[in-house]
Structure formats: structure tokens, C-alpha cells
Image: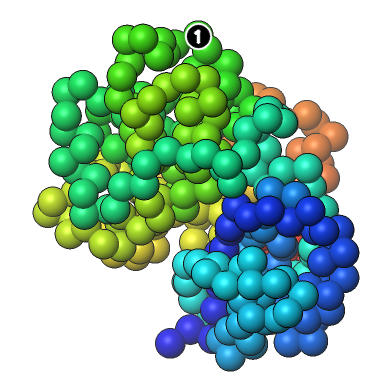
Amino acid sequence: MSKYLTAALYKFVSLPDYKTLQAPILAECQKHNIKGTLLLAGEGINGTIAGLPDDVRKVLDYLRQDPVFKQRLANLEHKESYADEHPFYRMKVKLKKEIVTMGVPSVNPNNTVGTYVKPEDWNALISDPDVILLDTRNDYEVHIGTFKGAVDPKTTTFREFPEFIAQNLDKTKNKKVAMFCTGGIRCEKASSFMKEQGFEEVYHLQGGILKYLETVPEAQSQWQGECFVFDQRVAVKHGLEVGDYDQCYACRMPLSQEEMQSPQYVAGISCPHCYDKVSEEKRAALTERQKQVMLAKQRGEAHIGEKLKK
């Protein structure tokens, strides 16, 4: 068993007092040597924390049970993964306008949301020829894997999603829409937006791609490729096994084994996606940083820049 437990969590819940919750949550995390990032907004909580398993579970219990939250996070769900090294360098609790940024103030999943579909029922839904299947993730995520037949909106940020819907979908013609994302949070907001726009039958994958890959046997799966994740694993496959992708430090794009064989790939400095876009000044800075990382490894230490990129 790996040493460190990572817990990814989110919940849309009314937190009008979210600013007053920042200090006590940070203190509780620091008390148990927990590191990571949590986002707080009036619409809820979102983030990832990591530490020794018992310490992580104490913080999760605190969030679910402490009177300061008035039972609002009592049914907070989380997803777990393990790592041999601590995936984060420090603990941050940030105050935000949204816990996942769409930029449409009227959208509130606490008021309305689409229909949840369990992973075991997902294949039947997306096999319906009348269903439009939408991948709500960004282009670099879709690049390495998606569901068979899914529409790629080619967005670079979630803020672009409303415009994509306005230009490409018609509520009078596209009667059934099913959507999915990594862990479920973007779909809750996306489905809330579409319901607000007048789409009546809106479905989303409960628990996201990660729950699907964990639950549905590979032989029955409609998933193609790997799933990008926002931690040290970079990507996962069926059964949540660590995938074959790495990540470019310069542009953050996930890289296949083939792409890492390209002459344009230089570890820590460039890859085929950004080779022609990296300025000489940035290339020099990245080269120096990579040199320091390698020297730190030779000394058996973890370079601070290596930690911070995670």
C-alpha cells in the first residue's frame, strides 16, 4: 500500500457564510498535516487534499460532522487514490465566486440539475440513437480519451461551454442530451445551465468517468483511450490503473509514449504541442529549472519546483 491518500471531493450546497469557513478549514487541515487545495464559494466546496490516510479521514469527518457546517456537508462524497510521494507542497483554502468556473451567475446546481445516471446504466442511455452525447471537458483532456460517439466541443476552458451550446444545439431538435466529465462536477453545472436554457431531457454520468472506469468491466466499456486526471498519475485506465501518459511541464499537455519519442520533446522544457511556442527566454528558464531538478534528484532530494507543479 502506498503511503499517502489523496481525496478528491466536491459538493454543490448553499454556503452563504463560505468566507467565515476558510480559516477553520485551513486550521483543521494544518492540524493534521494535510496538503492540497480546497475552493469555497457560495455554491459549495471543491478540491483535492492528501496526507497520511488516518489524517485525511479525520479532515473528511470534520467536514461532514463539525457543527460549524450545520450538517450541510454530511453526505459529502469523495474519491480516493494513493501515492508513494506526497502529491502537494502546501495547503490552500481559496475563496472563489464559483467552485467550477462557467461565468454564468444565474446557474445554480443547488436549484436545478439534470438527471443522474449510474455507471451501470450509462451504456444503455448512450446507445439510444436519439441521444446527443457531450464531453464537457477541455480539448487537452478529450485528446487522450473519450466515450465512443461523443461530441467534442473543443473548448479550452469551461467558460466556453455556454457559447458552444448556443451555436450548436437546439432545444427544439436535440430532445435528449447526455453529458460526462472526469468526476461529475462540471456536468452538474453544465446540466443546470442547459435546464435553465430550456432543454428538458438532460442526463449526466453520476460520479463521472472515474466512477465508470472503476465500475464497468472493460469488456463492456464504451470508453476509448485513457482519462486525464489532475494529479501525479496524469491519466488512468480501466480499473483506475495508472495510464501510459506523462505531462509536459511547459504547456501541461498530456503526452503519449510516442510523443515523448519526438525530437521536439525535451523533458521539462518542450514537447510537440509547444515546441514552436516556447520563447527563448522561457526555454532558458525551463532549462535551468530542469537542471536544478536533476541535481536535486542526484542528491536524493525533491526540488521545490517539481513539487509545486503538482
Quarter of the image where one finds residue 150: top left
Check the image and report above or below for 16 versus 191. Answer: below
Q: Quadrant of the N terminus?
A: bottom left
Scheme of colours in the image: rainbow
Residue 264 visible in image:
no
Check the image and report above or below for 153 versus 46. Answer: above
Q: Quadrant of the C terminus?
A: bottom right
Check the image and report above or below for 239 versus 65. Answer: above
Most extreme residue toward the bottom is: 54
Q: Residue at x 26, y 41 (%)?
A: 224
Q: Residue at x 13, y 51 (%)?
A: 220
Quarter of the image where one finds residue 90: bottom right
Q: Is residue 156 left or right of residue 258?
A: right
Closest to the observer: 48 or 106? 106
| Total residue callouts | 1
Residue 73 x/y as whole percent? 61, 68
Q: Residue at x 52, y 12 (%)?
A: 166
The amino acid marked with disc number 1 is: Gln
Residue 141 x/y as whole percent? 48, 39
The 10 Å Cα crowd at callout 1, few under 14, some 14 to 19, many 20 or more, is few
Q: Which residue is mark 1?
A: 167
Check the image and report above or below for 158 versus 233. Answer: above
Residue 186 x/y as whole percent? 53, 42
Residue 44 visible in image:
yes
Residue 28 x/y as whole percent? 78, 81
Element at label 1 = helix
Q: Is residue 109 left or right of residue 280?
A: left
Closest to the observer: 37 or 124? 124
Q: Residue at x 68, y 30 (%)?
A: 106
